[in-house]
Image: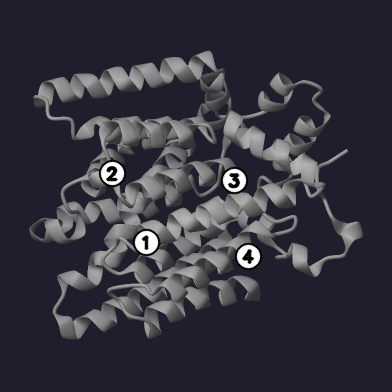
Amino acid sequence: MFPYLGFISLFAMLVLFGRRERMSVMAAALAVVAITIFVGLRHNVGMDWNNYLWMTNRVDVASTIGGKLGVTEPGYAFLLWISTWTGLGIYFTNFVAALLFALGLVRFARTCPSPTLALLSAIPFLVLVIAMSANRQAVALSVMLLALARWPAMSLKGRLVAVGIAATFHYSAIIYVIFAAWDVRVRQEFRLVGAAVISLAAIFLLDSLGRVDYATEAYMSGDEYAQTSGSILQMALTVGPALLLLLFWRKRDLLFPQGVVRQLALFAFALLPVGLLYPVLTARVLIYTFPMAMYVWSSLPQIVMPRSRVFVSLATVAVMFAQMLLWLNFSPNARAHFPYQNFLGIEAWEWETGLS
């Protein structure tokens, strides 16, 4: 428990003792280093640790390039392939994945009204739960976070390129095609038809790659294998902040400025009916809307009087500590996070590289 408390405390101190409106280069670098070391050098931590050991081994023993790149999404498979050359296996992959994730996360946080609050809000869920287990999706999200940091200035072509790169690490990132094309200046009915066509095309592509069958088995079946405890809570972590769009409608331009932040909130609302039927699948998709939650948390001090903003920041810090402690103590999935071990603190004979 103490390693996690120490980790989140570092980001809480950035909120309490740093400048609320901006994050210095030194603070940003410290955050990147802390996340990369804590997440990227973990040893035998996370629900998917054994799954990624298996993937690493599959790539290692495959005799052809096609066999190696066919183990999982090609971008991540290529990263696994490089890891087999280093002799470090899963540790190299995790380190690179965590570095990319940290760079994307910090870069996006620095575009929010309060970068330190945005970063802190990501620690309990996006960092400890997602980045320490769902490696491929974390890397895919990191690409999109880097893109979201300059989204308004990007052309449609640039956005689609970013989505394409992200999808090479996790095919589910293709959902961002909807947001890439959202701002195209066409009549509303054409935009809706376009979104439907894009969604159908995405499903067709995933089906041709065999990912629909996998998703059906992994996320939509009633088997015990498919049931991820806490999916409803995970949905609440993104849909909850989105609800503030309704609760604070008059403050919507502060909490949800026009553009992708508001679009992500509307998309989260639209997924609610699906979440009632398939909470696991929906929770996975909603991971991509979490940048909206980061922006909302960082904007909360702006909707109160200046003299009250410090109390809102303190309350946010308390909420994030509570969220992390509740998950670590009561989520069955949290068992895979104990004990926390780090590559820097183990002997060579304890390594689990996944290599043959």
* Residue 212 position within the rendered picture, expressed as x and y whole percent measured from the top left: 51, 21
Q: In this image, 121 relative to 50: left or right?
A: left
The answer to whether residue 195 is seen in the rendering is yes
In the picture, measured across the screen, residue 335 lies left or right of residue 58, that is: left
User: Left or right: 98 with respect to 336?
Assistant: left
Q: Is tag 2's residue or tag 3's residue first in the polypeptide sequence?
A: 3
Q: Earlier in the sequence, mark 4 or mark 2?
A: 4
Q: Amino acid at mark 4?
A: Phe
C-alpha separation, residue under disc 2 versus residue under disc 3: 22 Å
- Mark 3 = which residue? 135
Give the secondary structure at mark 2. helix
Q: Nearer the viewer, residue 14 or 88?
A: 88
User: Which of the two discs, 4 and 2, sits closer to the camera?
Assistant: 4
The numbered mark, 1 or 2, whose residue comes first in the sequence reads: 1
- Give the Cα separation between the discs numbered 4 and 2: 29 Å
Q: Which residue is mark 4?
A: 38
**What kind of residue is marked 3?**
Asn
Q: Could one spot residue 224 in this view of the protein?
A: no
The residue type indicated by label 1 comes to Ala
Mark 1, residue position: 109
Structural distance between the alpha carbons of marks 1 and 4:
19 Å
Mark with earlier residue (1, 4): 4
C-alpha gap between disc 1 and disc 2: 16 Å
Above or below, 91 relative to 209 = below
**Callout 3 environment at 10 Å: few (<14), some (14 to 19), or many (20+)?**
many
Q: Which mark is residue 118?
A: none
Callout 4: SS: helix
Q: Residue at x 80, y 35 (%)?
A: 57
Q: CB of mark 1 within 8 Å of CB of mark 4?
A: no
Residue 300 image point, x, y percent: 24, 68
Question: Which residue position holds label 2?
Answer: 264
Q: Are marks 1 and 2 in contact (CB under 8 Å)?
A: no
